[in-house]
Image (cartoon, coloured by chain):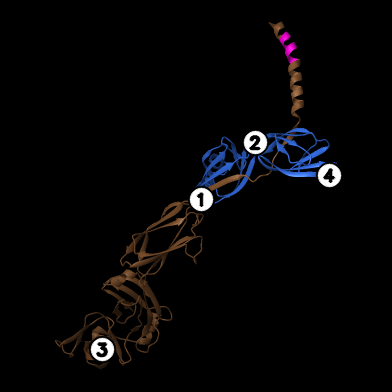
Chain colours: A brown, B blue
């Protein structure tokens, strides 16, 4: 068997080898490199763009504006909105934006909500975007704009400024907000817009003074701003010597006698201008405010024990 | 690809990148071609549901018998991108002449002076220049569409066999 293969090898190798050699000569040499012609490749690129759906639930606290203008700003550009939509006040704001229109690295995107109602202020919602898909933002509460009450506090007697006077906004007897006038007598209080619907809203000025505080009902009909200058204490018409009631429900009577007709019950801090004195009573005048803000002077008698002398200069010192 | 990003640059960055990743599909003609993205082998085509981030990327396609393809693409932020590559074949051709003393130049960079040679030529147009005693005696374009044998005759247009 081995001899057979050896014999076969001897008779077959050399003819095959010579045949291949002669064929290679016939075919010619091969160029060592592939020759390219640097042709531009044919390539097709197709993009599929998604969209961004934004959902912003809205909740109205009290009043509802009729229409709302929504403006969506992106990438910290607060000048040119990428979309503006005016619609009836919805329960949720929905919009769709092209992919890539929002910044998804930081909270530089913003929805500006502009109620078409002067009782509402515009509010903004900043948010971080996404490449594409859906964003559901936290619920935004739409409140009517703040009501602003401002003014100055004066001493009625000489129209001088009264600093550090307590100013309170009350709904019935509930104190909503407190503040004090500054050294220039100026005060300003902002209260929620929905307070405009309260029927018992009032301002009380001067509770930290010995005078009867000024109390006034607040009504916001055509404006969200009220200016109320508070004149406190006795007017210039009240001439000295001045006395002040030390407690509430002080009898202001027609005569000095026991059993005389009671004209008024005076509150604490009421100023009485005294002109006559008896062993048990003072005869004097009080100021009574009537409709239209006018004051009239009324005369009467007050028990001596219910009054103490009023010194306006000492009041200022007490206030300061 | 995802796993490379995941394990090489950390979970935090992976999360942020994942938000901006784009679905990538790659088709080639012919298919079953090795596809490289930024030097990393994505596998053989067709490639489906890979992920890519927006920005500049280099695609390389390699298959024996075809001209290799290198393509730089700036991928836009989008939901998905599908890329089709059409590879240009390389044909085995023969070039013969009975003329003597000629030097042939192809595309300005390949030279030979033998009268019978085998060439691997990319399909498309090639520029052939012929020199005799260092003097240009002929210049013509040849178009390769299939494996062919060319016979060159001096100052005559080459003809297909």
Up/down of B53 relative to A310, above or below: above
Residue bearing mark 3: A286
Q: Residue furthest left?
A: A259
Please tell me in which quadrant of the rendered image residue A149 appears.
Answer: bottom left
Q: In this orientation, does residue B57 appear?
A: yes
Structural crowding at the residue carrying mark 1, measured as other residues with C-alpha within 10 Å and reported as few (<14), some (14–19) or many (≥20): many
Q: Is residue A156 left or right of residue B28?
A: left
Badges 3 and 4, same chain: no
Residue B33 is inside the magenta segment: no
Chain containing the residue with disc 1: B
Label 1 to label 3: alpha-carbon separation = 82 Å
Q: Residue at x 27, y 91 (%)?
A: A274
Q: Which residue is mark 2?
A: B146
Q: How far separated are the C-alphas under marks 2 and 1?
A: 40 Å
Secondary element at image label 4: strand
Give the alpha-carbon distance from disc 1 to disc 4, as whole Å. 57 Å
Question: Does residue B12 lie above or below A77 as drawn?
Answer: above
Residue A12 on image: x %, y %? 73, 13
Q: Say which label, 2 or 1, has the lower sequence index.
A: 1
* Residue A110 locus on image (x, y percent): 46, 61
Quadrant where the image shows the C terminus of chain B: top right
Residue at mark 2: chain: B
Q: Position of residue A227 (x, y in %)?
A: 36, 80
**Sequence-wise, which precedes: disc 4 or disc 2?**
4
Q: Which residue is mark 4?
A: B135
- Residue under circle 1? B78
> Could you tell me how far apart the alpha carbons at marks 4 and 2 are, in whole angstroms?
31 Å
| Mark 1 or mark 3, whichever is nearer to me | 1
């Amino acid at each position: 068997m081995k001899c057979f293969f050896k014999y076969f090898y001897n008779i077959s190798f050399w003819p095959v080898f010579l045949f291949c050699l002669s064929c290679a000569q016939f075919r010619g040499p091969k160029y060592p490199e592939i020759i390219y012609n640097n042709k531009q490749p044919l390539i097709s690129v197709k993009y599929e763009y998604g969209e961004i759906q934004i959902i912003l639930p809205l909740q109205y606290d009290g009043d509802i504006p009729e229409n709302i203008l929504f403006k969506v700003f992106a990438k910290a550009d607060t000048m040119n909105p990428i979309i503006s939509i005016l619609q009836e006040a919805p329960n949720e704001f929905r919009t769709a934006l092209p992919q890539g229109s929002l910044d998804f690295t930081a909270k530089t995107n913003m929805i500006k909500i502009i109620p078409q109602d002067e009782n509402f202020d515009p509010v903004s919602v900043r948010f971080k975007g996404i490449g594409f898909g859906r964003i559901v933002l936290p619920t935004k509460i739409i409140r009517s704009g703040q009501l602003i009450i401002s003014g100055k506090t004066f001493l009625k007697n000489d129209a001088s400024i009264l600093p550090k006077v307590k100013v309170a906004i009350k709904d019935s007897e509930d104190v909503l907000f407190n503040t004090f006038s500054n050294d220039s007598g100026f005060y300003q209080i902002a209260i929620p817009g929905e307070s405009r619907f309260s029927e018992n809203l009032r301002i009380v000025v001067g509770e930290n003074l010995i005078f009867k505080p000024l109390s006034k009902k607040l009504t916001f009909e055509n404006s969200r701003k009220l200016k109320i200058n508070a004149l406190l204490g006795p007017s210039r018409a009240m001439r000295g010597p001045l006395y002040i009631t030390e407690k509430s429900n002080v009898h202001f009577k027609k005569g000095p006698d026991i059993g005389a007709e009671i004209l008024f019950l005076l509150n604490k801090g009421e100023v009485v201008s005294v002109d006559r004195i008896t062993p048990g009573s003072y005869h004097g005048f009080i100021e009574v405010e009537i409709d239209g803000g006018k004051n009239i002077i009324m005369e009467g008698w007050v028990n001596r024990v219910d009054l103490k002398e009023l010194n306006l200069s000492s009041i200022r010192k007490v206030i300061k | 690809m995802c796993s490379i990003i995941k394990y090489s640059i950390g979970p935090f960055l992976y999360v942020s990148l994942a938000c901006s990743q784009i679905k990538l599909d790659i088709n080639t003609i012919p298919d079953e071609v090795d596809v490289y993205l930024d030097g990393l082998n994505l596998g053989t085509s067709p490639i489906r549901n890979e992920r890519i981030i927006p920005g500049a990327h280099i695609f390389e396609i390699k298959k024996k018998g075809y001209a290799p393809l290198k393509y730089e693409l700036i991928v836009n932020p989008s939901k998905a991108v599908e890329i089709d590559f059409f590879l240009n074949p390389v044909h085995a051709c023969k070039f013969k002449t009975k003329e003597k003393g000629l030097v042939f130049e192809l595309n300005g960079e390949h030279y030979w002076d033998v009268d019978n040679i085998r060439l691997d030529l990319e399909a498309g147009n090639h520029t052939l220049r012929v020199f005799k005693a260092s003097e240009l005696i002929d210049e013509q374009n040849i178009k390769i569409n299939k494996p062919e044998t060319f016979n060159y005759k001096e100052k005559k247009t080459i003809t297909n066999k």
